[in-house]
Image (spheres, rainbow, N blue to C red):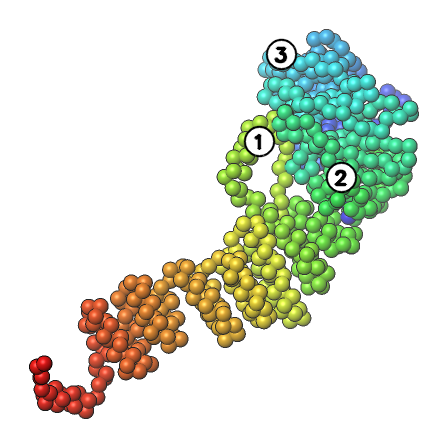
Amino acid sequence: MLELGATFIPFEPDRSAHDGNITRNFFDCSSQRICTMRNNGALGLTSKSLQNDKITNVRTKDRGEPSTVKFSPDGRLCVMQRAPNTADVIFLEKTENSLCLELTVSTKSKEPLLAVEWITNNQLLLVNNHSAELLFINEDKKSSKLIKATNVNAAWAIYYAPSQLLLIANGQSCSNLQPIIVAHSQFTRMKNFEVDFGGSISKENFLEKDAAIATIYGKVYIMVFRYSNRSATMLDLYELPFDASTAPQFRHSLILGFNGGCGIHVIDNLVIVHHQSSQKSMIFDIKVSSPSKSHSPLVTTTIESHPQHQPPPALYTNFWFTFLPDVVIDSAGGVMYSIRLKNEKSQLEISEKHTMLEYLARRRGEKKLFIVSFLSCLRARALSLRQIRKVFAMLSGAVGGATKTPKSAENSVETALKAVMTCEKYSSLVVTQHEMQSAVLIPLREDASLPESYVANIMLQYLRSLFDASITPEAYLIEMVVETLAEAGEMSKLQQIVTYRVINDSKPLAFLLLSYEARCSTLFQSGVDILARNKACDEIVEVMLEKKQIVDAFRFIDVRNLNEALIPKVVEAANQHCSRQTRYAIREHLTEKKAKASLYKSIGDDLYTEAEIKEAANEQATCALFEI
């Protein structure tokens, strides 16, 4: 699942020639550049990066061998530490003699420097045992100015550029860590905390090489190697809060179970630990469900080289140097590689299908692969309904997270105002209802080898996940779910989701339920109820007339005081389907209600025969009045 060298850059390896020509290489973690110095810069300084094709070539004065070479974010300035207590700022603009101008800076106390870091394009951070100082570098005047300083007690310090985080170690065993945010020309101290590094007689102090900082799933973690006398080496993760008032917390412990040299990468929110002696790489995903804070490797695999490298380079050698997030430097071969994930192999490496889908859903840019794998698992019936529900819940939760309640939105704003640290945000996989229907549900429905009840249950699980996430199902999805349940004969389940209002009322849904009256008589009344809740009175009258329920339709119009425009339709239907007594009752009622005669005139045309009219006239002519 890991591939080396999809992108790579060659550089000149380190060498110490007999003729006095010396080549040294340095890696700048902040700018992710490999810096090659020949004769301490007198013969040239070259920097390259895997992220872009820009190559910097300059010459500097030979003032001794540097221990650190770092570039500013815009690449216009470079800082070298040639002496223990000073740093030289190199202005990377060629002068007439092709040598770059330099500026020497130091802290006020002139103490040895522990760290030299670029904060912005023209702000330089210097850290010694007792202070951290922020300098402004003026390119035009070739001068420096102290902006801010703060007192610290530091044994060593590391800097994490993406979050502008300075981590200082102090205390008797260097296990007390003090995070400091260096932003907006200010130092903001966060709460310090103690880490467990497995101190023993053989290992009394916590060392800089045993700590690293990375962003995982939108949170910043301090990663600490914890050793023990046994072989169960651990990598502990301490989460840093975004606001300074909250203390960092221990969150996860990754079980490595080995001793010896290793390297760490953090790629696409996965922690990858490479073990040199066993030539194995362990991939950890802290989001995978775990009942405790301890995590075993999700996958244990071996790095493969990209086919473009022929012959393949040696792997896991003593000449390898690993840097976060994904850089491997082969100092002997003179090549800087990147390592990437081959997620298409996850189906072979991860046997548990639900875990494999959970893994793919969290990988960046793998939506198509996830959907194809999900459909394949559903067709193979490799997932239980409970696991299917969990997958749908994960996807629906990502969609529903974008729509927050006013209260949660207010809390988010309040948290953002308190935040002093920032990091790269994590975006969950979002699969829209349209994508789910077209890419998963419709293909399942069209698969003749699958039982209709199985497909119907899958759709119900998806509908349930939308309901739990407070997401309104779209009309075309509801129609497909109803049709699938009807085809599967799951009328009781269909009746339940309608009765308990799992799906929203709509006219199309009502007419769809009315069409299933022959299969389930109760669905007819449910459809009428939905029309009533939507105040679709005209449609209700039409349904009653179609069912030849003339009197009920007339009564409905009368009770609801509906528009008189519906009366001619009822009268016409009454003339076609009702008895003479019923038509007479309708006519008399309309007369009593003083309705317009034009609305019920057609009832009187054939209400009586000519013989009956003649007989009635004779009876009226011969009748006598009696006075009591």
Residue 176 drawn at (x, y percent): 76, 22
Residue 619 drawn at (x, y percent): 13, 89
Question: Does the image show residue 407?
Answer: yes
Most extreme residue toward the top is 109
| Disc number placed over residue 293 in the picture, else none | 2
Residue beneath the point at 65% across and 70% down: 451
Q: Residues within 10 Å of mark 2 (few under 14, many from 20)?
A: some
Badge nearest the viewer, 3 or 1: 1
List the residue tagged with mark 1: 415
Of helix, strand and loop, which one carries label 3? Answer: strand
* Earlier residue among tags 3 and 1: 3
The amino acid on which the numbered mark 1 sits, given as a three-letter code, is Thr
Q: CA distance from mark 3 to mark 1?
A: 34 Å
Of helix, strand and loop, which one carries label 1? Answer: helix
Q: Nearer the viewer, residue 492 or 20?
A: 492
Residue beneath the point at 52% across and 72% down: 520
Residue 43 drawn at (x, y percent): 77, 22
Residue beneath the point at 63% across and 54% down: 392
List the residue tagged with mark 3: 145
Residue beneath the point at 67% across and 46% down: 362
Badge nearest the viewer, 3 or 2: 2
Q: CA distance from mark 3 to mark 2?
A: 47 Å
The answer to whether marks 3 and 2 mark residues whose Cβ atoms lie closer than 8 Å is: no
The quadrant of the image that shows the C terminus is bottom left
The amino acid on which the numbered mark 3 sits, given as a three-letter code, is Lys
* Earlier residue among tags 2 and 1: 2
Q: CA distance from mark 2 to mark 1?
A: 25 Å
Which quarter of the figure has residue 10? top right
